[in-house]
Image: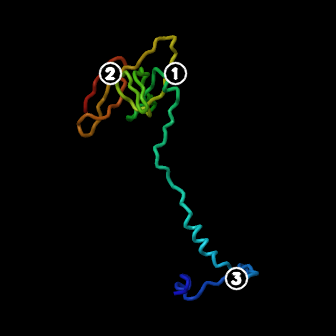
Amino acid sequence: MKTSSAELVYGAPLTLPGDFIVAQDTPLDNVDASLLPNMGDRVRKLVPKRTRLHVQPRSSVTSDIMRSDYVFVRRDSHRSPLSQHNEGPFHVVERNDKFFKLEMGGKTESVSLDRLKPAFLDFTEPVQVADASIVSTSSSGGSSVTDLVTTGNEQQTLLDS
């Protein structure tokens, strides 16, 4: 079938007004016979651009947090208006690439690096470390991820509510 798709749809070949067509000096019969195969080879060699980079992006961690002896921990739970976003400062016991081990309320807890901010403290005065208790939050009733709740000077352990 030597017809174009437009001719099949409309029943006649598409034509353009003469203003859009530029006069050619050479007729199409004189075009090099290798033009079409060469063009096909070039199109086959085209490689599509990757649309997405499938690697884990490096998180931006300040160099200050790796040197800091004390850090603040972001509280991810629901907060009342005008309440603090972070709790602390807490003493850093151990540093890892993804998490820090902190001394929180007499216990050592692992906290993700994404929730931490370095604490810039005045060391001319004694550092007052926050008291904290751990609240177990779980919908299934078992143990799960722990959230930090500051209770001031008194410590209270709140169990599943």
Q: Nearer the viewer, residue 15 or 76?
A: 15
Residue 98 appears in which quarter of the rendering?
Answer: top left
Q: Give the Cα separation between the discs numbered 3 and 2.
A: 87 Å
Q: Find residue 93 and report its horizontal and vertical position in percent.
A: 40, 21
Q: Amino acid at mark 2?
A: Lys
Label 2 residue SS: strand
Label 3 residue SS: helix
Q: Give the Cα separation between the discs numbered 2 and 1.
A: 23 Å
Callout 3–callout 1 Cβ contact below 8 Å: no
The residue indicated by pointer 3 is 30
Which residue: 52% across, 11% down? 124
Q: Find residue 127 and report its horizontal and vertical position in percent.
A: 45, 14
Label 1 residue SS: loop
Q: Find residue 55 and report its horizontal and vertical position in percent.
A: 46, 46
Q: Find residue 70 and report its horizontal and vertical position in percent.
A: 45, 21
The residue indicated by pointer 2 is 107
Check residue 120 in the rendering and tell me which mark sits there, or answer none.
1
Taking the view exactly as shown, the residue that stands out farthest to the left is 141
Which residue: 51% across, 36% down? 60
Q: Amino acid at mark 3?
A: Asn
Estimate how packed mark 2 is, as few (under 14), some (14 to 19) or many (20 or more) residues with alpha carbons within 10 Å: few
Task: Using residue 117 as the reference point, say whether residue 7 is left or right of it.
Answer: right
Q: Amino acid at mark 1?
A: Phe
Estimate how packed mark 1 is, as few (under 14), some (14 to 19) or many (20 or more) residues with alpha carbons within 10 Å: some
Q: Give the Cα separation between the discs numbered 3 and 1.
A: 80 Å
Task: Using residue 157 as the reference point, say whether residue 68 is left or right of it.
Answer: right
Q: Nearer the viewer, residue 134 or 10?
A: 10
Q: Nearer the viewer, residue 74 or 6?
A: 6
Residue 30 appears in which quarter of the rendering?
Answer: bottom right
Q: Nearer the viewer, mark 3 or mark 1?
A: 3
